[in-house]
Amino acid sequence: MAGILLPHHEDMLYLRAGHVVGMEVSLTKRTDGSKDWHHRYFFPRWGVSVNAYDLGSPYMGNGYGGRIFFDLPMTKARNFFLKVSFGAGWIEKPFDLDDNPRNSAIGSHLNAALGVEAHWLDGLIRLLALRLLGLNR
């Protein structure tokens, strides 16, 4: 997957030196229908994922994360999903007054890993999802 950093202030534009490139590996379990809400919400899925990103900035390095997620079907056909995730993240180069004073965005190695995305599952290849839009923090 690929993306861009979105600085929340124009003084941080220098942090965006290139595109963010990364990967995600997930283990997913669909609800089994043993409860009424499983049917009502079209058998939502849940799971865990691990992520690795090259953040595209020499001041930030790489980022890694582990998250728990809920994959909520938006259609009865279960091919369009909204995925919500939360967990912990690690960044290689946080702000440090002596070693990395240029990273004014992230001050700690340990951070929250949050995400929301919309994705499409093809009926032929259920192992691969087409991510339509995703926001990760």
Image: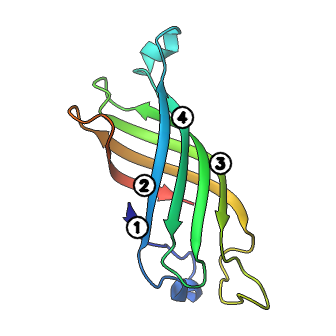
The residue beneath circle 3 is 87
The residue beneath circle 1 is 3
- Give the alpha-carbon distance from disc 3 to disc 1, as whole Å: 20 Å
In this rendering, which labeled residue sits more in front, label 2 or label 4?
Answer: 4
Given the current orientation, which residue lies at the most extreme right position? 98
- Give the alpha-carbon distance from disc 2 to disc 3, as whole Å: 16 Å
Instruction: Count numbered badges in the picture.
Output: 4
User: Which of the pair 64/9 is nearer the observer?
Assistant: 64
N-term mark: 2 or 4: 4
The quarter of the image holding the C terminus is bottom right
Residue shown at 43% from the left, 14% from the top: 39
Mark 2 closeness class: few <14, some 14–19, many ≥20 residues within 10 Å: some
In this rendering, which labeled residue sits more in front, label 2 or label 3?
Answer: 3
Mark 4 closeness class: few <14, some 14–19, many ≥20 residues within 10 Å: some
The answer to whether 38 appears left or right of 129 in the picture is right
The residue beneath circle 2 is 134
Q: Amino acid at mark 2?
A: Gly
- Give the alpha-carbon distance from disc 2 to disc 1, as whole Å: 9 Å
